Amino acid sequence: MTTAPHPTLLGADVIEPAGSTAQLVTAALVGIVVIVALITWLKVHPFVALTLGAIGVGIGAGLAPGAAVTSFTNGFGSTAGGVGVLIGLGAMFGKLLADSGGADRIVDTLVARAGVRSLPWIVGLIGALVGLPMFFEIGLVLLIPIVILVARRTQTPLMRVAIPALAGLSVMHGLVPPHPGPLTAVTTLNADLGLTLALGLLIGIPVIVLAGPVFSRFAARWVPVAAPQPLSETEADEAEARPRPSFVVAVLGILLPIVLMLLRSIADAVAPTATDGGKGLIDFLGTPVVALSIALLYAMIFFGRAARMGRAGVQASLTSSLPGVAGILLIVSAGGGFKQVLIDTGIGTVIADAVSNTGISVVLLAWVVAVLIRVATGSATVATVTAAGIMAPIAANLAGPEVSLIVLAIGAGSLFLSHVNDAGFWLVKEYLGLSVGQTLKSWTVMECIISVLGLGGVLILDIFI
Protein backbone atom coordinates (compact mmCIF):
# COMPACT_ATOMS: atom_id res chain seq x y z
CA MET A 1 0.00 0.00 0.00
CA THR A 2 1.45 3.34 -1.07
CA THR A 3 2.06 5.95 1.59
CA ALA A 4 3.35 9.43 1.04
CA PRO A 5 7.11 9.78 1.38
CA HIS A 6 8.75 12.76 3.00
CA PRO A 7 9.70 15.20 0.20
CA THR A 8 13.15 15.95 1.56
CA LEU A 9 14.04 12.27 1.58
CA LEU A 10 13.58 12.11 -2.16
CA GLY A 11 15.51 15.24 -2.95
CA ALA A 12 12.42 17.03 -4.26
CA ASP A 13 12.30 20.80 -4.50
CA VAL A 14 10.48 21.93 -1.38
CA ILE A 15 8.84 25.35 -1.46
CA GLU A 16 9.41 27.45 1.64
CA PRO A 17 6.04 27.90 3.37
CA ALA A 18 4.64 31.43 3.13
CA GLY A 19 3.45 31.34 6.73
CA SER A 20 3.35 29.23 9.86
CA THR A 21 1.92 25.72 9.74
CA ALA A 22 -1.19 26.84 11.64
CA GLN A 23 -1.70 29.75 9.24
CA LEU A 24 -1.31 27.54 6.17
CA VAL A 25 -3.65 24.82 7.41
CA THR A 26 -6.25 27.37 8.52
CA ALA A 27 -6.09 29.16 5.18
CA ALA A 28 -6.51 25.90 3.24
CA LEU A 29 -9.44 24.67 5.34
CA VAL A 30 -11.22 28.03 5.32
CA GLY A 31 -10.65 28.36 1.58
CA ILE A 32 -12.18 24.95 0.85
CA VAL A 33 -15.15 25.69 3.12
CA VAL A 34 -15.68 29.04 1.39
CA ILE A 35 -15.60 27.38 -2.05
CA VAL A 36 -18.12 24.77 -0.96
CA ALA A 37 -20.37 27.40 0.66
CA LEU A 38 -20.30 29.65 -2.39
CA ILE A 39 -21.32 26.78 -4.67
CA THR A 40 -23.92 25.11 -2.45
CA TRP A 41 -25.40 27.96 -0.41
CA LEU A 42 -25.03 31.09 -2.50
CA LYS A 43 -25.30 29.19 -5.81
CA VAL A 44 -22.22 30.90 -7.22
CA HIS A 45 -20.82 29.37 -10.41
CA PRO A 46 -17.96 26.97 -9.57
CA PHE A 47 -15.54 28.96 -11.75
CA VAL A 48 -16.12 32.12 -9.70
CA ALA A 49 -16.07 30.18 -6.42
CA LEU A 50 -12.76 28.50 -7.24
CA THR A 51 -11.22 31.78 -8.36
CA LEU A 52 -12.21 33.70 -5.24
CA GLY A 53 -11.36 30.79 -2.94
CA ALA A 54 -7.93 30.24 -4.51
CA ILE A 55 -6.88 33.88 -4.29
CA GLY A 56 -8.26 34.06 -0.75
CA VAL A 57 -6.25 31.00 0.27
CA GLY A 58 -3.09 32.56 -1.15
CA ILE A 59 -3.56 35.81 0.72
CA GLY A 60 -4.61 34.05 3.93
CA ALA A 61 -1.55 31.80 3.75
CA GLY A 62 0.83 34.74 3.59
CA LEU A 63 1.30 35.56 -0.08
CA ALA A 64 1.12 39.20 -1.16
CA PRO A 65 -2.19 39.93 -2.94
CA GLY A 66 -0.45 40.46 -6.27
CA ALA A 67 1.55 37.26 -5.86
CA ALA A 68 -1.61 35.31 -5.05
CA VAL A 69 -3.28 36.55 -8.24
CA THR A 70 -0.17 35.76 -10.29
CA SER A 71 0.03 32.28 -8.81
CA PHE A 72 -3.61 31.63 -9.68
CA THR A 73 -3.35 32.93 -13.25
CA ASN A 74 -0.17 30.92 -13.86
CA GLY A 75 -1.93 27.74 -12.78
CA PHE A 76 -5.05 28.68 -14.73
CA GLY A 77 -3.05 29.25 -17.91
CA SER A 78 -0.98 26.09 -17.69
CA THR A 79 -4.06 23.96 -17.06
CA ALA A 80 -6.01 25.57 -19.89
CA GLY A 81 -3.07 25.02 -22.19
CA GLY A 82 -2.70 21.40 -21.21
CA VAL A 83 -6.36 20.44 -20.97
CA GLY A 84 -8.30 22.99 -23.00
CA VAL A 85 -7.23 21.74 -26.42
CA LEU A 86 -8.04 18.15 -25.48
CA ILE A 87 -11.47 19.05 -24.12
CA GLY A 88 -12.25 20.99 -27.28
CA LEU A 89 -11.14 18.15 -29.58
CA GLY A 90 -13.05 15.59 -27.53
CA ALA A 91 -16.21 17.69 -27.60
CA MET A 92 -15.99 18.08 -31.38
CA PHE A 93 -15.48 14.36 -31.92
CA GLY A 94 -18.39 13.47 -29.64
CA LYS A 95 -20.71 15.92 -31.38
CA LEU A 96 -19.82 14.54 -34.82
CA LEU A 97 -20.40 11.00 -33.56
CA ALA A 98 -23.86 12.00 -32.38
CA ASP A 99 -24.86 14.26 -35.28
CA SER A 100 -23.74 11.80 -37.94
CA GLY A 101 -25.77 9.00 -36.39
CA GLY A 102 -22.66 6.97 -35.56
CA ALA A 103 -23.69 6.58 -31.92
CA ASP A 104 -27.18 5.50 -32.99
CA ARG A 105 -25.63 2.92 -35.31
CA ILE A 106 -23.61 1.41 -32.45
CA VAL A 107 -26.69 1.23 -30.25
CA ASP A 108 -28.96 -0.26 -32.90
CA THR A 109 -26.42 -2.86 -34.04
CA LEU A 110 -25.68 -4.18 -30.58
CA VAL A 111 -29.30 -4.17 -29.43
CA ALA A 112 -30.43 -5.97 -32.60
CA ARG A 113 -28.05 -8.84 -31.89
CA ALA A 114 -28.97 -9.24 -28.24
CA GLY A 115 -31.52 -11.55 -26.72
CA VAL A 116 -33.77 -10.34 -23.93
CA ARG A 117 -31.64 -12.02 -21.24
CA SER A 118 -28.44 -10.45 -22.55
CA LEU A 119 -29.92 -6.96 -22.93
CA PRO A 120 -28.51 -5.58 -19.63
CA TRP A 121 -25.01 -6.67 -20.67
CA ILE A 122 -25.34 -5.27 -24.18
CA VAL A 123 -26.74 -1.98 -22.93
CA GLY A 124 -23.89 -1.71 -20.42
CA LEU A 125 -21.43 -2.21 -23.27
CA ILE A 126 -23.23 0.46 -25.28
CA GLY A 127 -23.03 2.88 -22.36
CA ALA A 128 -19.29 2.28 -22.08
CA LEU A 129 -18.66 2.66 -25.82
CA VAL A 130 -20.74 5.80 -26.16
CA GLY A 131 -19.33 7.13 -22.88
CA LEU A 132 -15.71 6.86 -24.02
CA PRO A 133 -15.72 9.91 -26.33
CA MET A 134 -18.74 11.80 -24.97
CA PHE A 135 -19.45 13.93 -21.94
CA PHE A 136 -21.87 12.31 -19.50
CA GLU A 137 -24.75 14.69 -20.21
CA ILE A 138 -24.49 14.23 -23.98
CA GLY A 139 -24.33 10.46 -23.66
CA LEU A 140 -27.30 10.49 -21.30
CA VAL A 141 -29.47 12.54 -23.66
CA LEU A 142 -28.47 10.23 -26.51
CA LEU A 143 -28.99 6.90 -24.74
CA ILE A 144 -32.07 7.41 -22.57
CA PRO A 145 -34.57 7.47 -25.48
CA ILE A 146 -33.00 4.24 -26.78
CA VAL A 147 -33.12 2.66 -23.33
CA ILE A 148 -36.78 3.54 -22.93
CA LEU A 149 -37.66 2.24 -26.40
CA VAL A 150 -35.81 -1.05 -25.76
CA ALA A 151 -37.53 -1.52 -22.40
CA ARG A 152 -40.99 -0.99 -23.90
CA ARG A 153 -40.48 -3.14 -26.99
CA THR A 154 -39.03 -6.09 -25.06
CA GLN A 155 -41.27 -5.70 -22.00
CA THR A 156 -38.12 -5.55 -19.85
CA PRO A 157 -38.23 -3.73 -16.48
CA LEU A 158 -36.88 -0.22 -17.02
CA MET A 159 -34.17 -0.49 -14.36
CA ARG A 160 -32.78 -3.68 -15.93
CA VAL A 161 -31.66 -1.72 -19.00
CA ALA A 162 -31.35 1.83 -17.62
CA ILE A 163 -28.92 1.03 -14.80
CA PRO A 164 -26.35 -0.77 -17.02
CA ALA A 165 -26.40 2.10 -19.53
CA LEU A 166 -25.95 4.66 -16.75
CA ALA A 167 -23.17 2.59 -15.18
CA GLY A 168 -21.26 2.48 -18.47
CA LEU A 169 -21.59 6.23 -18.95
CA SER A 170 -20.72 7.09 -15.35
CA VAL A 171 -17.63 4.87 -15.10
CA MET A 172 -16.20 6.26 -18.32
CA HIS A 173 -16.95 9.80 -17.14
CA GLY A 174 -15.25 9.37 -13.79
CA LEU A 175 -12.34 7.03 -14.46
CA VAL A 176 -11.24 7.23 -18.08
CA PRO A 177 -9.56 10.14 -19.91
CA PRO A 178 -10.10 12.14 -22.07
CA HIS A 179 -13.13 13.17 -19.99
CA PRO A 180 -12.53 16.58 -18.35
CA GLY A 181 -12.30 15.35 -14.77
CA PRO A 182 -9.78 12.52 -15.20
CA LEU A 183 -7.91 14.51 -17.84
CA THR A 184 -7.52 17.48 -15.50
CA ALA A 185 -6.31 15.21 -12.70
CA VAL A 186 -3.80 13.61 -15.10
CA THR A 187 -2.46 17.04 -16.04
CA THR A 188 -2.47 18.42 -12.49
CA LEU A 189 -0.69 15.40 -11.02
CA ASN A 190 1.59 14.97 -14.05
CA ALA A 191 0.45 11.37 -14.55
CA ASP A 192 1.02 9.32 -17.69
CA LEU A 193 -2.17 9.61 -19.75
CA GLY A 194 -1.83 6.30 -21.58
CA LEU A 195 -1.07 4.35 -18.41
CA THR A 196 -3.94 6.02 -16.56
CA LEU A 197 -6.28 5.20 -19.45
CA ALA A 198 -5.18 1.55 -19.46
CA LEU A 199 -5.55 1.17 -15.68
CA GLY A 200 -8.88 3.00 -15.80
CA LEU A 201 -10.22 0.52 -18.34
CA LEU A 202 -8.82 -2.39 -16.33
CA ILE A 203 -10.70 -1.23 -13.24
CA GLY A 204 -13.71 0.15 -15.09
CA ILE A 205 -14.80 -3.02 -16.91
CA PRO A 206 -15.51 -5.14 -13.79
CA VAL A 207 -17.02 -2.10 -12.07
CA ILE A 208 -19.46 -1.63 -14.96
CA VAL A 209 -20.40 -5.31 -14.76
CA LEU A 210 -21.11 -5.24 -11.02
CA ALA A 211 -22.73 -1.80 -10.83
CA GLY A 212 -24.62 -2.30 -14.10
CA PRO A 213 -26.09 -5.69 -15.09
CA VAL A 214 -25.61 -7.26 -11.64
CA PHE A 215 -26.98 -4.39 -9.56
CA SER A 216 -29.81 -3.81 -12.05
CA ARG A 217 -31.47 -6.99 -10.77
CA PHE A 218 -31.86 -5.41 -7.33
CA ALA A 219 -32.73 -1.98 -8.71
CA ALA A 220 -35.56 -3.49 -10.76
CA ARG A 221 -37.06 -4.91 -7.55
CA TRP A 222 -36.59 -1.73 -5.52
CA VAL A 223 -37.88 0.55 -8.29
CA PRO A 224 -40.49 -1.44 -10.29
CA VAL A 225 -41.47 1.28 -12.75
CA ALA A 226 -42.66 1.15 -16.35
CA ALA A 227 -40.79 2.94 -19.09
CA PRO A 228 -42.19 6.40 -19.91
CA GLN A 229 -43.52 7.14 -23.38
CA PRO A 230 -40.67 7.15 -25.91
CA LEU A 231 -40.41 8.83 -29.28
CA SER A 232 -43.34 8.25 -31.57
CA GLU A 233 -42.98 5.45 -34.08
CA THR A 234 -42.85 8.02 -36.88
CA GLU A 235 -39.94 9.86 -35.28
CA ALA A 236 -38.15 6.58 -34.64
CA ASP A 237 -38.62 5.48 -38.25
CA GLU A 238 -37.34 8.84 -39.54
CA ALA A 239 -34.23 8.54 -37.35
CA GLU A 240 -33.67 5.00 -38.64
CA ALA A 241 -33.97 6.10 -42.28
CA ARG A 242 -31.25 8.77 -42.10
CA PRO A 243 -27.87 7.82 -43.63
CA ARG A 244 -25.38 6.90 -40.94
CA PRO A 245 -21.83 5.55 -40.60
CA SER A 246 -21.50 1.78 -40.42
CA PHE A 247 -20.93 0.07 -37.09
CA VAL A 248 -17.30 -0.68 -37.94
CA VAL A 249 -16.57 2.91 -39.01
CA ALA A 250 -18.14 4.32 -35.83
CA VAL A 251 -16.33 1.95 -33.46
CA LEU A 252 -12.98 2.46 -35.22
CA GLY A 253 -13.34 6.20 -34.69
CA ILE A 254 -13.86 5.72 -30.96
CA LEU A 255 -11.00 3.27 -30.55
CA LEU A 256 -8.47 5.12 -32.73
CA PRO A 257 -7.18 7.69 -30.17
CA ILE A 258 -7.28 5.12 -27.37
CA VAL A 259 -5.12 2.66 -29.31
CA LEU A 260 -2.63 5.37 -30.28
CA MET A 261 -2.20 6.56 -26.69
CA LEU A 262 -1.93 3.01 -25.35
CA LEU A 263 0.69 2.12 -27.96
CA ARG A 264 2.78 5.07 -26.83
CA SER A 265 2.60 3.97 -23.20
CA ILE A 266 3.54 0.41 -24.14
CA ALA A 267 6.49 1.64 -26.20
CA ASP A 268 7.66 3.84 -23.33
CA ALA A 269 7.47 0.90 -20.92
CA VAL A 270 9.24 -1.54 -23.24
CA ALA A 271 11.94 0.79 -24.59
CA PRO A 272 11.99 3.98 -22.51
CA THR A 273 15.38 5.14 -23.81
CA ALA A 274 14.95 4.23 -27.49
CA THR A 275 15.38 7.11 -29.94
CA ASP A 276 14.95 5.39 -33.31
CA GLY A 277 12.48 6.57 -35.93
CA GLY A 278 9.82 4.01 -35.11
CA LYS A 279 9.75 4.90 -31.42
CA GLY A 280 9.70 8.59 -32.28
CA LEU A 281 6.74 8.09 -34.61
CA ILE A 282 4.80 6.14 -31.97
CA ASP A 283 5.55 8.83 -29.38
CA PHE A 284 4.32 11.52 -31.76
CA LEU A 285 1.12 9.73 -32.83
CA GLY A 286 0.36 8.77 -29.21
CA THR A 287 0.64 12.32 -27.91
CA PRO A 288 -2.89 13.10 -26.67
CA VAL A 289 -3.32 16.23 -28.80
CA VAL A 290 -2.12 14.39 -31.91
CA ALA A 291 -4.17 11.25 -31.21
CA LEU A 292 -7.38 13.21 -30.68
CA SER A 293 -6.65 15.40 -33.71
CA ILE A 294 -6.27 12.29 -35.87
CA ALA A 295 -9.54 10.92 -34.49
CA LEU A 296 -11.29 14.21 -35.24
CA LEU A 297 -9.98 14.26 -38.81
CA TYR A 298 -11.16 10.67 -39.19
CA ALA A 299 -14.61 11.67 -37.93
CA MET A 300 -14.81 14.70 -40.21
CA ILE A 301 -14.03 12.56 -43.25
CA PHE A 302 -15.70 9.23 -42.58
CA PHE A 303 -18.59 10.19 -40.27
CA GLY A 304 -19.41 13.26 -42.34
CA ARG A 305 -19.28 11.40 -45.66
CA ALA A 306 -21.35 8.45 -44.44
CA ALA A 307 -24.03 10.77 -43.05
CA ARG A 308 -23.93 12.99 -46.17
CA MET A 309 -23.44 16.02 -43.95
CA GLY A 310 -21.36 17.96 -46.45
CA ARG A 311 -18.73 20.52 -45.53
CA ALA A 312 -21.29 22.96 -44.16
CA GLY A 313 -22.91 20.27 -42.00
CA VAL A 314 -19.60 19.15 -40.55
CA GLN A 315 -18.62 22.73 -39.83
CA ALA A 316 -21.97 23.43 -38.14
CA SER A 317 -21.59 20.32 -35.97
CA LEU A 318 -18.07 21.28 -34.89
CA THR A 319 -19.09 24.87 -34.14
CA SER A 320 -22.10 23.85 -32.06
CA SER A 321 -19.95 21.52 -29.92
CA LEU A 322 -17.87 24.25 -28.29
CA PRO A 323 -20.29 26.52 -26.36
CA GLY A 324 -21.35 23.63 -24.14
CA VAL A 325 -17.80 22.97 -22.92
CA ALA A 326 -16.87 26.59 -22.16
CA GLY A 327 -18.08 26.33 -18.57
CA ILE A 328 -16.27 23.02 -18.05
CA LEU A 329 -13.02 24.48 -19.37
CA LEU A 330 -13.27 27.48 -17.03
CA ILE A 331 -13.94 25.24 -14.04
CA VAL A 332 -11.06 22.85 -14.65
CA SER A 333 -8.68 25.75 -15.40
CA ALA A 334 -9.70 27.50 -12.19
CA GLY A 335 -9.04 24.22 -10.40
CA GLY A 336 -5.54 24.32 -11.87
CA GLY A 337 -5.14 27.83 -10.53
CA PHE A 338 -6.23 26.68 -7.08
CA LYS A 339 -3.69 23.87 -7.25
CA GLN A 340 -0.88 26.28 -8.11
CA VAL A 341 -1.77 28.54 -5.18
CA LEU A 342 -1.63 25.55 -2.81
CA ILE A 343 1.81 24.72 -4.17
CA ASP A 344 3.21 28.27 -4.13
CA THR A 345 2.13 28.95 -0.56
CA GLY A 346 3.93 25.82 0.66
CA ILE A 347 0.71 24.28 1.93
CA GLY A 348 1.54 21.21 -0.13
CA THR A 349 4.73 20.68 1.84
CA VAL A 350 2.78 20.79 5.09
CA ILE A 351 0.19 18.32 3.76
CA ALA A 352 2.90 15.97 2.51
CA ASP A 353 4.68 16.05 5.86
CA ALA A 354 1.46 15.42 7.78
CA VAL A 355 0.39 12.48 5.62
CA SER A 356 3.84 10.89 5.53
CA ASN A 357 3.97 10.87 9.31
CA THR A 358 0.60 9.11 9.68
CA GLY A 359 1.22 6.24 7.25
CA ILE A 360 -2.16 6.78 5.58
CA SER A 361 -2.41 5.43 2.05
CA VAL A 362 -2.37 8.38 -0.35
CA VAL A 363 -4.77 6.46 -2.58
CA LEU A 364 -7.33 6.25 0.22
CA LEU A 365 -6.67 9.88 1.18
CA ALA A 366 -7.25 11.01 -2.41
CA TRP A 367 -10.56 9.14 -2.53
CA VAL A 368 -11.76 10.57 0.79
CA VAL A 369 -10.91 14.14 -0.21
CA ALA A 370 -12.78 13.77 -3.51
CA VAL A 371 -15.77 12.18 -1.75
CA LEU A 372 -16.08 15.03 0.76
CA ILE A 373 -15.99 17.69 -1.95
CA ARG A 374 -18.35 15.73 -4.19
CA VAL A 375 -20.96 15.25 -1.47
CA ALA A 376 -20.74 18.92 -0.49
CA THR A 377 -20.79 20.52 -3.95
CA GLY A 378 -22.61 17.92 -6.05
CA SER A 379 -20.10 18.36 -8.87
CA ALA A 380 -17.84 15.51 -9.94
CA THR A 381 -15.69 17.93 -11.93
CA VAL A 382 -15.21 20.33 -9.01
CA ALA A 383 -14.43 17.40 -6.72
CA THR A 384 -11.84 16.08 -9.15
CA VAL A 385 -10.01 19.32 -9.86
CA THR A 386 -10.00 20.41 -6.21
CA ALA A 387 -8.84 17.04 -4.88
CA ALA A 388 -6.17 16.87 -7.58
CA GLY A 389 -4.87 20.27 -6.50
CA ILE A 390 -4.70 19.18 -2.88
CA MET A 391 -2.91 15.93 -3.76
CA ALA A 392 -0.49 17.42 -6.33
CA PRO A 393 2.40 18.16 -3.91
CA ILE A 394 2.24 14.62 -2.56
CA ALA A 395 1.99 13.00 -5.99
CA ALA A 396 5.06 14.93 -7.16
CA ASN A 397 7.24 12.58 -5.12
CA LEU A 398 5.70 9.30 -6.25
CA ALA A 399 6.45 6.91 -9.11
CA GLY A 400 4.43 7.09 -12.33
CA PRO A 401 2.07 4.13 -11.81
CA GLU A 402 1.26 5.27 -8.28
CA VAL A 403 0.33 8.74 -9.57
CA SER A 404 -2.05 7.14 -12.08
CA LEU A 405 -3.69 5.24 -9.22
CA ILE A 406 -4.19 8.51 -7.33
CA VAL A 407 -5.91 9.93 -10.41
CA LEU A 408 -8.26 6.95 -10.51
CA ALA A 409 -8.92 7.13 -6.77
CA ILE A 410 -9.91 10.77 -7.15
CA GLY A 411 -12.13 9.89 -10.11
CA ALA A 412 -13.86 7.14 -8.13
CA GLY A 413 -14.39 9.45 -5.17
CA SER A 414 -15.86 12.15 -7.40
CA LEU A 415 -18.79 9.85 -8.24
CA PHE A 416 -19.83 9.03 -4.68
CA LEU A 417 -23.38 9.75 -3.40
CA SER A 418 -25.00 11.76 -6.17
CA HIS A 419 -28.01 13.41 -4.56
CA VAL A 420 -30.22 16.49 -4.84
CA ASN A 421 -27.34 18.98 -5.27
CA ASP A 422 -26.12 17.18 -8.40
CA ALA A 423 -27.47 18.17 -11.82
CA GLY A 424 -26.97 14.60 -13.02
CA PHE A 425 -29.38 13.39 -10.32
CA TRP A 426 -32.17 15.54 -11.73
CA LEU A 427 -31.38 14.65 -15.33
CA VAL A 428 -31.76 10.95 -14.55
CA LYS A 429 -34.90 11.54 -12.48
CA GLU A 430 -36.68 13.54 -15.18
CA TYR A 431 -35.62 11.44 -18.17
CA LEU A 432 -36.68 8.18 -16.52
CA GLY A 433 -39.81 9.64 -14.93
CA LEU A 434 -38.82 8.68 -11.38
CA SER A 435 -39.63 10.16 -7.99
CA VAL A 436 -36.86 11.53 -5.78
CA GLY A 437 -37.00 8.43 -3.60
CA GLN A 438 -36.82 6.10 -6.59
CA THR A 439 -33.84 8.01 -7.99
CA LEU A 440 -32.06 7.70 -4.64
CA LYS A 441 -32.69 3.93 -4.53
CA SER A 442 -31.44 3.38 -8.08
CA TRP A 443 -29.11 6.06 -9.46
CA THR A 444 -27.63 7.20 -6.13
CA VAL A 445 -26.98 3.65 -4.91
CA MET A 446 -25.41 2.78 -8.28
CA GLU A 447 -23.04 5.77 -8.04
CA CYS A 448 -21.98 4.71 -4.53
CA ILE A 449 -21.33 1.18 -5.75
CA ILE A 450 -19.20 2.49 -8.62
CA SER A 451 -17.23 4.73 -6.27
CA VAL A 452 -16.52 2.05 -3.65
CA LEU A 453 -15.72 -0.65 -6.21
CA GLY A 454 -13.47 1.78 -8.06
CA LEU A 455 -11.56 2.45 -4.84
CA GLY A 456 -11.34 -1.29 -4.23
CA GLY A 457 -9.86 -1.84 -7.69
CA VAL A 458 -7.32 0.90 -7.15
CA LEU A 459 -6.28 -0.50 -3.76
CA ILE A 460 -5.85 -3.98 -5.25
CA LEU A 461 -3.65 -2.64 -8.04
CA ASP A 462 -1.73 -0.61 -5.45
CA ILE A 463 -0.59 -3.86 -3.85
CA PHE A 464 1.07 -5.06 -7.05
CA ILE A 465 2.30 -1.80 -8.62
Image (tube, rainbow, N blue to C red):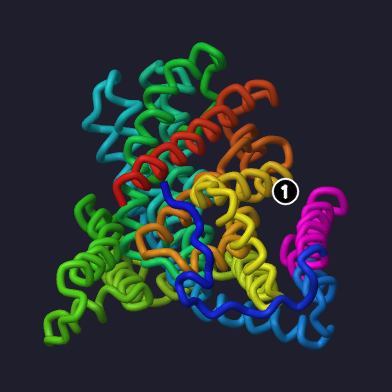
Residue at the image position 19 percent from the left and 77 percent from the top: 282
Q: Position of residue 278 (x, y in %)?
A: 12, 81
Which residue range is magenta in the image?
23-52
Q: Nearer the viewer, residue 134 or 188?
A: 188
159 over 318 or under it: above or below: above
Q: Quadrant of residue 29?
A: bottom right
Residue at the image position 26 percent from the left and 81 percent from the top: 284
Tag 1 residue: 377
Provide the secondary structure element on which disc 1 rests: helix
Q: For this view, does 63 lie left or right of residue 229?
A: right
336 over 431 or under it: above or below: below
Q: Quadrant of residue 267?
A: bottom left
Q: Quadrant of residue 38?
A: bottom right
Q: Examine the structure image and report whether residue 257 is included in the region drawn in magenta.
A: no
23 over 159 or under it: above or below: below
Residue at the image position 38 percent from the left and 76 percent from the top: 289
Q: Position of residue 270 (x, y in %)?
A: 16, 68
Name the amino acid type tagged 1: Thr
Q: Position of residue 250 (x, y in %)?
A: 27, 56
Residue at the image position 82 percent from the left and 60 percent from the top: 26
Q: Nearer the viewer, residue 336 or 259?
A: 336
Q: Residues within 10 Å of mark 1 (few under 14, many from 20)?
A: many
373 over 393 or under it: above or below: above
Q: What is the chief secondary structure element of the magenta stretch? A: helix
Residue found at the far right of this picture: 42
Q: Position of residue 161 (x, y in %)?
A: 42, 27
Q: For this view, does 40 lie left or right of residue 299?
A: right
Q: Examine the structure image and report whether residue 30 is included in the region drawn in magenta.
A: yes
